[in-house]
Each structure stands twice: as structure tokens, then as C-alpha cells.
Amino acid sequence: MQFYLRYAWCMRSFDHEDLDRRLENYYGRYRAGYSSGTYSPGTNAPSQADAQQRGDLHNMCDLLRALPKSCKIMIQYDHVFLYTNQLTTLEHMSQVEYIYRWLVGEAVIAYPKNTVMLQNPVHQYRTFLKSRWWDPDTSARIKKFLLGRQDLFRIPRGFCEKLERPGRLATRDHHFVDHDDPDLLLMLSLVCPGIINKTLPIQAK
């Protein structure tokens, strides 16, 4: 299901204080522009959310937080996307009066759950890393461990380039390495406890 809700991007954390802060920061940039003469009022300025819109956004935050954990939520600009197998969830959300242009579609998933499907896979497992900044010493250990074992890990090009840069390392939840030996994960965990997010099997399409 997808639907339109103005300023939906401000709800990404589903936190009420963060929602208000994002809205204020958004308008604050334009107000600062007016004082410096950079912008022309009424031309480049976005319309400010009124009390009703703010109330709807806060209400939607509560609705989204109350959805089952099996429901995946994605917010892109002013659109919200819900992915779920529960029709009652979709029926409930479609009754919300202040959402617009909502659509419901059905996708047939032919691939097995919690499995990475690749054409002509080379390795057996894909391990995703946790999203966080690492201190300088830990960053150096991670880089040395992974870059020194490229015969055992397949490291995507973009992530490999990041590992080769000097300074602190920031891993993201979309960063991954492919490998065959599960024991490598134990070694990685010893080098950097808490870096592993999840490991999925790889199968051929």
C-alpha cells in the first residue's frame, strides 16, 4: 500500500519531538534566507504546516508505530509505503481520512524468505554489517582484517573503496561481505564485537 501525506518525510523516526524539530528546522532555513535577502518571500518559501496538518502527522506517527513488526514501512518524501501480508492492516489504514491518493497492490514473491538470490553465485553466505561509526583503533582493525582477506571475502567495490580511505570508518546496514566459511564471522566478531547485523544464505536463481 502507498499513500500521500504532506511532510511525511518528517516522520522517519516515528518520534513526536523529532517530527516537530524537523518541521521547525525546515522552515528555519527559509526564515534565515529571508533575513539575509537570499529568498523572495512567497516565491521560494514552502507552505508551513498548519495545526491540522501537524495533528495529522502526529496521529500518523502513532498509527505507524502501532503496526505489526512484520509490516515494513518506507517513507520517501511525501509518500508512505507499507508492505504487509495482513489485509486487516491495509483495510484499517485505508480508512484514515487525511491520507490521499492511496493505492493497494499485490506482489507475488517467488523467492524464499531470508535468502539472497543471485545469478551464478560464487559464495555461500552474505553477512550484513551494523550501521555505526567506529573509533580510530577499531576502524583500523576492521580495515586490516577485511582488506587482508580479500581471497576469503568478496567485498563490493564501493565498500572496498571506503575501507581503503584513511580515517574513521562508518559502516552502514547495506554494507555486506560474501564468504564461504562461517568461522570467519567469529574472527570478525573478535576483531570488532557487535559489527555483524545478520547473515543470510546465498542461492542461485
Image (spheres, rainbow, N blue to C red):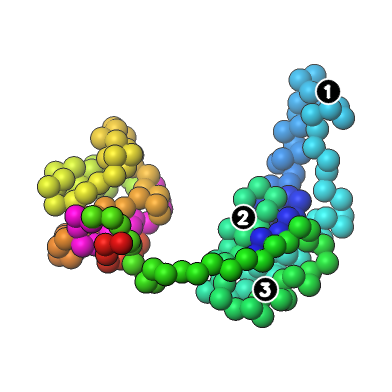
Q: Where is mark 3, residue-wise?
A: 90
2 vs 1, front mark: 2
Compared with 34, 9 (above or below) is: below
Q: Where is mark 2, residue-wise?
A: 75
Q: Residues within 10 Å of mark 3 (few under 14, many from 20)?
A: some
**Quarter the N terminus occupies:** bottom right
* Element at label 2: strand
**Quarter the C terminus occupies:** bottom left
Q: What is the three-letter code of the residue carrying label 2?
A: Ile
Could you tell me residue 51's position as x and y percent? Answer: 87, 55
Residue 63, by quadrant, is bottom right
3 vs 2, front mark: 3
* Residue in the image at 62% along x and 55% along y: 75
Could you tell me residue 168's position as x and y percent? Answer: 33, 39
Q: Are marks 2 and 1 in contact (CB under 8 Å)?
A: no
Residue 83, by quadrant, is bottom right
**Camera-nearest residue between 98 and 25:** 98
Q: What is the three-letter code of the residue carrying label 3?
A: Leu
Query: Magenta stretch?
Result: 121-133
- For marks 1 and 3, the one nearer the N-term is 1
Could you tell me residue 137's position as x and y percent? Answer: 26, 44
**Camera-nearest residue between 8 and 116:** 116
* Element at label 1: loop
128 drawn magenta: yes
Q: Where is mark 1, residue-wise?
A: 40
Q: Residues within 10 Å of mark 2 (few under 14, many from 20)?
A: some
78 drawn magenta: no
- For marks 3 and 2, the one nearer the N-term is 2
* Element at label 3: helix
Q: Are marks 1 and 3 in contact (CB under 8 Å)?
A: no
Compared with 175, 194 (above or below) is: below
Q: Taking 66 as reference, is 177 left or right? A: left
